[in-house]
Image (cartoon, helix red, strand yellow):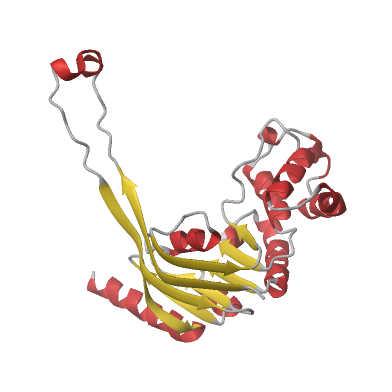
Amino acid sequence: MARIVMEHINLTFRVCPNRVLTFKEFLLGKFLRKKEEDKEIKVHALRNINLEIPQGGRVGIIGHNGAGKSTMLKTLAGIYQPSAGTRIVEGKISSLFEITLGFEPECSGWQNIAFRSYLQGETPTTVAAKKQGIADFSELGSFLGMPVRYYSAGMMVRLAFSIATAVDPEILLIDEVLGAGDLAFLNKAKKRMRDMMDRAHLMVMVSHDLESVRSMCDRVLWMDHGTIRMEGPANQVIEAYQQSMSANVQAA
């Protein structure tokens, strides 16, 4: 059984701004420069989040830029540890965000298929069984024998997407990955994504594409400045969000 529970979750980032020193200040230090105390800046990224997603849940997260959508997703994934509150996750997490980061540029496509698959929890045995399927889906052919530093941005996305989606997810977390890739690859990628979502025991996605959220999710969270402003059925929350955005545009 897959399940996610967040109880009174708060997340605060602490940032210490550093003033750039001149070369003279660096050399002479305290003799010519007054001592300055760096003031710590606290950014309250998530505020008192309470959320429960049961087995079978299909949840979308929407909101303006900076609302806390991706921060929420990364907290669910365990990338960010809460400053306060309780996070409970039952089930194996498969995350699809920033999928093109972390490739070994001097290694071939084939080698990177293995490296990235291991990071996703695969074993040499399971990688061997999936490797050809990943290669076929990417349509990169002989380019897989080349170091990936020679790949175009589109080729890199094809390879990254093919590896990232070759999983059998229990908990699937997605951040805007549907907008990735070149046009020729997009329709195939969307079908693959839908197949993954159907197989997942539980799915949470962040997207600015409200129609994708509406069609793929039965429940939606509207994030606003680190809080859940509204939660409920997808159509109801999306309609309220669109009305709010239209009102803001008219008032501007």
Q: Is residue 118 above or below residue 77?
A: above
Quarter of the image where the C terminus is located: bottom left
| Total numbered labels | 0
- The image quadrant of residue 28 is top left
**Residue name at image x 75 percent, y 58 percent:** 166
User: In this rendering, does residue 31 appear at all?
Assistant: yes
User: In this rendering, does residue 208 appear at all?
Assistant: no
Percent position (x, y) of residue 67? Answer: 37, 64
Q: Is residue 67 left or right of residue 159?
A: left
Percent position (x, y) of residue 206? Answer: 51, 66
Q: Is residue 39 left or right of residue 230?
A: left
Percent position (x, y) of residue 112? Answer: 73, 41
**Residue name at image x 66 percent, y 63 percent:** 92
Percent position (x, y) of residue 138? Answer: 76, 51
- The image quadrant of residue 66 is bottom left
Q: Is residue 179 left or right of residue 231?
A: right
**Residue name at image x 61 percent, y 47 percent:** 100
Q: Is residue 164 left or right of residue 174?
A: right
The front one of 233 and 136 is: 233
Q: Is residue 170 above or below residue 120?
A: below
Quarter of the image where the N terminus is located: bottom right
- The image quadrant of residue 151 is top right
